[in-house]
């Protein structure tokens, strides 16, 4: 199975590299992810944005994916970047992609391979647990629990949701993983986020095992589309903060 990705390469040489994991049912081509990645490249951080399996241009079936496959895909992207260019010093994750990034970052303390140089983690509108997404999906279509599969409309598109995905989200002990994070952790979240409540950011601030910083994105929405300057601010904030560590 092949994953698709886009590498944003700095024009004047890179000082570090990063991998960006997208949100649930989003893709590497989400406007906010594209713009943040390109601005990070402008700030000399080589950035790989990629599609999880079954999404965008990556192979695989979305119905067969779950949180474990997201973590596996993120690890594969990290390994490719390390072999093709340089190991990432920074992981960035948006929403559920942020949860996957935290899970992977928790492995870094004992890692001697592609994660050996990981020095910082930035999460954007990320949840402190995955069970809340499972319950949301079930609430959208009763057929999922009744028959094992049902469609849920997200972003104007119908997505096949299976019980194996629900159970994956329900059973993941993300809190235990978050506590194992040892790299500095930048948490960006909007108090007005209607998809992942701001309380999740407070929980991450308390639970993350690394040196944590919380930046409130006042007025921003979950996908950073209602205020054009939010994307620029996020990119500049991540770059300035990460520069202390990478």
Image (cartoon, helix red, strand yellow):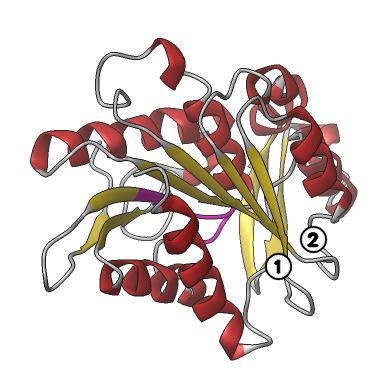
Q: What residue lies at 47% left-to-right and 18% top-to-bottom?
A: 107
Q: Residue at x 85, y 66 (%)?
A: 191
Query: Which circle marks residue 212 in the picture?
Result: none
Please say if the residues under marks 1 and 2 sit with CB atoms less than 8 Å apart.
yes
- Farthest residue in the top direction? 110
Q: Secondary structure at mark 1?
A: loop
Q: Position of residue 124 (x, y in %)?
A: 62, 56
Which residue lies at the image location 37% right of the left edge and 67% below the top edge? Answer: 37
Position of residue 68 measured from the top left corner of the image (x, y, whole percent): 53, 26
Label 2 sits on residue? 195
Does 196 appear above or below 246? below
In this rendering, would 24 be left or right of 92?
A: right
Q: Which mark is residue 222?
A: 1
The boundaries of the magenta stretch are: 19-27
Tell me which residue sits at (33%, 40%) in the image.
89
Question: On the rendered structure, is 215 left or right of 243?
Answer: right
């Amino acid at each position: 199975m092949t994953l698709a990705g886009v590498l944003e390469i700095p024009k004047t040489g890179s000082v570090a590299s990063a991998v960006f994991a997208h949100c649930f049912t989003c893709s590497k081509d989400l406007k906010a992810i594209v713009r943040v990645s390109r601005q990070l490249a402008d700030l000399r951080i080589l950035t790989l944005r990629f599609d999880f399996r079954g999404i965008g241009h990556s192979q695989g079936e979305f119905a067969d994916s779950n949180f474990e496959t997201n973590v596996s895909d993120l690890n594969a992207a990290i390994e490719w970047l390390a072999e093709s260019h340089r190991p990432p010093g920074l992981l960035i994750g948006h929403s559920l992609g942020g949860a996957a990034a935290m899970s992977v970052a928790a492995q870094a303390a004992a890692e001697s391979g592609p994660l050996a140089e990981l020095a910082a983690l930035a999460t954007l509108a990320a949840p402190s647990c995955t069970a809340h997404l499972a319950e949301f999906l079930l609430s959208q279509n009763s057929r999922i629990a009744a028959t094992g599969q049902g469609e849920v409309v997200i972003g104007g598109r119908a997505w096949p949701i299976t019980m194996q995905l629900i159970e994956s989200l329900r059973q993941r002990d993300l809190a235990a993983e978050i506590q194992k994070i040892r790299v500095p952790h930048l948490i960006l979240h909007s108090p007005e986020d209607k998809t992942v409540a701001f309380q999740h950011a407070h929980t991450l601030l308390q639970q993350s095992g690394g040196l944590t910083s919380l930046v409130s994105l006042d007025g921003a929405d979950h996908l950073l589309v209602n205020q054009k300057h939010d994307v620029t601010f996020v990119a500049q904030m991540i770059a300035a903060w990460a520069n202390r560590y990478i």
